[in-house]
């Protein structure tokens, strides 16, 4: 009997003892973040599935796992013999676990879950969709802690000061700006559940996660005090003393819900329902008027200040130098030195750790050859790793964390001579990248209104890609960080000057190859006319675009001019940091077409 089967049996015994018909587990943590610590990787511990998105549903006779299509192949392999089955869409119907609950459970069944790791908006959706079944819900049910005997500890890294030379503002000023917005909205308290919001406001960072420099924490902002809920001994003495002077009171992390329930001096509280757990939401006293919206820091930090923008420019040079040396090495040593996807991940990391102030990758580096590149979120494992051939398509998506910013860039290059079909696909993707990068649009525009610009050339050829075109990027925080985005989804957040986001159209041909070209862009004011204020983008990522994959006949003169100008900037900014041989190589790579 496998360990997963044994754990499942123990969980079912606990369900039976508590009169529970179905138990739901989410791959999440109390902060509802993208990356979660080992302590909260319950699904991986229970089932063996190691993907980054999943929900598990367990009854006395069924144990199923829902994930998205990028993990189907991986899930089927990892769940084999575990007692859990992968639940995939039937035909064209992409139903989720809530639909399964509705179709499979008897009326008045008892449904339980741990409310610490489910957002309140998801709980509402569940109750709304299942109202006709008259289920009994228990949102305060942790059955795992008593079973998981050797559970990893919660993160406890030390906080470090993110100095104003990087942040551009003193923490006292940021706190004042948040409180000013609270006053405008008539808010007495503001509950912050996302660590990135707290890190930004207090100018601190930490190492609780591998890719985002965060300290796991909650905060309640009041008119005169801030209650900061963190683990013990997380702050150096100097920081703790300054916090005390600023009215920041540090309390134990686990006391957040209890302290919320005791709030008295006020009658309104602002929370973000997509980032607030059921447990914390339900701890708010009934007499409070709850205002639900995006958090104030999430809106403020999305707009980078002058210092941050200058630092981002410096960071892009560092990141671009590492990538240039990496691609030069590949082209020089391919066929001489054995290269696999995983060895390239390590080699790129070697180039980056030589950079000043490099803190680590901002996500798991993607190095994908040929068919693997058709999987948008592929990351090589020992089981999937393949050796590079001398002919094919190589996709590299990488990012870094620096005190002066966060990077995310994708390049697709040809090994050997590309086919006409590959060149056409690459060029259509490039046209989309350029069209969005050169867009001019009125103030008040939302991401879904300009998403078409990146897709039009692909659509004209009957092609498309299934993910968004652009996501917001944090500043020495999360690589995926809203509230802004560019995608077909109806995001209500307008694009404003100072926002940093990605521009990444793509095309994926299953089991053949994938092509994605990604740069980061910053929005800025272009001009103001009698028709209002107009905005544009400035491309800040710096790395050559493989000209051998370009079909020049598909580009118009404006697109050619943009590419030549971009390549000229790449060479000008990166060449002072390269060796003579690398310079000669990059000069050819960035020569005008």
Image (cartoon, rainbow, N blue to C red):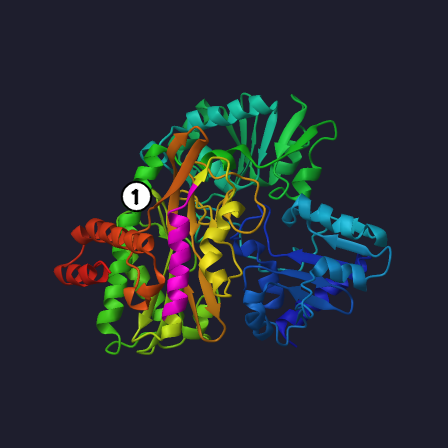
Looking at the rendering, the stretch of residues picked out in magenta corresponds to 423-440
Residue at coordinates 32% horizontally, 52% vertically from top-left? 558
Which residue is drawn at the image coordinates 35% and 75% (left, top)?
A: 419
**What residue sits 61% from the left and 25% below the top?**
187
x and y percentages locating residue 310 in the rendered image? 30, 38
Quarter residue 441 falls in: top left
Q: In the orientation shown, which residue stands out farthest toward the left?
A: 580
Q: Is residue 310 magenta?
A: no
Q: Is residue 197 left or right of residue 166?
A: right
For label 1, the residue is: 313
Q: State the quadrant of the C terminus.
A: bottom left
Residue 349 drawn at (x, y percent): 32, 60
Q: For residue 425: magenta?
A: yes
> Residue 512's quadrant in the figure?
bottom left
Element assignment for label 1:
helix
* Residue 354 visible in rendering: no
């Amino acid at each position: 009997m496998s360990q997963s089967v044994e754990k499942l049996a123990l969980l079912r015994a606990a369900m039976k003892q508590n009169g529970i018909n179905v138990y739901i587990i989410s791959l999440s943590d109390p902060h509802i973040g993208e990356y979660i610590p080992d302590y909260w990787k319950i699904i991986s511990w229970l089932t063996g599935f190691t993907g980054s998105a999943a929900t598990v549903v367990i009854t006395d006779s069924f144990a199923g796992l829902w994930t998205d299509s990028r993990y189907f192949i991986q899930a089927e392999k990892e769940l084999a013999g575990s007692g859990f089955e992968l639940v995939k869409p039937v035909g064209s119907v992409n139903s989720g676990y809530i639909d399964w609950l509705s179709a499979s459970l008897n009326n008045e069944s008892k449904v339980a879950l741990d409310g610490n790791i489910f957002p309140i908006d998801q709980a509402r959706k569940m109750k709304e969709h299942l109202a006709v079944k008259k289920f009994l819900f228990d949102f305060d049910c942790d059955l795992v802690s008593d079973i998981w005997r050797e559970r990893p500890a919660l993160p406890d890294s030390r906080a470090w000061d993110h100095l104003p030379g990087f942040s551009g503002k003193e923490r006292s000023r940021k706190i004042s700006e948040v409180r000013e917005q609270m006053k405008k909205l008539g808010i007495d308290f503001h509950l912050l559940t996302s660590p990135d919001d707290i890190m930004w406001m207090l100018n601190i960072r930490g190492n609780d996660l591998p890719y985002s420099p965060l300290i796991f924490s909650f905060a309640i902002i009041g008119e005169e005090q801030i209650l900061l809920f963190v683990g013990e001994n997380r702050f150096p003495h100097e920081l703790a003393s300054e916090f005390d002077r600023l009215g920041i009171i540090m309390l134990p992390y686990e006391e957040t819900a209890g302290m919320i329930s005791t709030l008295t001096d006020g009658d309104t509280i602002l929370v973000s329902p997509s980032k607030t757990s059921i447990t914390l939401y339900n701890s708010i006293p009934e007499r409070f008027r709850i205002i639900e919206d995006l958090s104030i820091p999430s809106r403020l930090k999305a707009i980078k200040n002058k210092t941050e923008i200058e630092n981002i420019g410096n960071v892009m040079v560092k990141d671009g130098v590492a990538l240039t040396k990496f691609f030069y090495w590949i082209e020089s040593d391919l066929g001489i030195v054995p290269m696999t996807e995983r060895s390239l991940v390590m080699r790129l990391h070697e180039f980056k750790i030589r950079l000043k102030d490099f803190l680590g990758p901002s996500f798991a580096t993607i190095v994908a050859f040929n068919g693997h590149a058709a999987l948008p979120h592929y990351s090589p494992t020992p089981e999937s790793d393949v050796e590079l051939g001398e002919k094919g398509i190589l996709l590299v998506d990488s990012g870094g964390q620096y005190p002066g910013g966060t990077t995310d860039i994708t390049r697709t290059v040809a090994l050997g001579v590309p086919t006409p079909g590959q060149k056409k696909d690459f060029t259509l993707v490039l046209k989309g990248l350029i069209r969005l990068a050169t867009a001019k649009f009125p103030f008040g525009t939302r991401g879904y209104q300009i998403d078409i610009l990146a897709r039009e050339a692909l659509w004209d050829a009957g092609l498309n890609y299934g993910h968004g075109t652009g996501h917001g990027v944090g500043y020495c925080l999360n690589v995926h960080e809203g509230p802004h985005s560019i995608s077909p989804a109806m995001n209500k957040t307008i694009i404003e000057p100072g926002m940093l986001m990605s521009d990444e159209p793509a095309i994926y041909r299953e089991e053949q190859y994938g092509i994605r070209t990604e740069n980061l862009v910053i929005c800025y004011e272009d001009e103001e006319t009698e028709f209002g204020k107009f905005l544009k983008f400035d491309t800040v990522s710096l790395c050559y675009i493989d000209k051998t994959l370009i079909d020049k006949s598909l580009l118009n003169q404006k697109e050619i001019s943009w590419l030549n100008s971009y390549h000229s900037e790449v060479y000008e900014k990166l060449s002072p940091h390269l060796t003579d041989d690398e310079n000669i190589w990059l000069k050819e790579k960035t020569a005008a077409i």
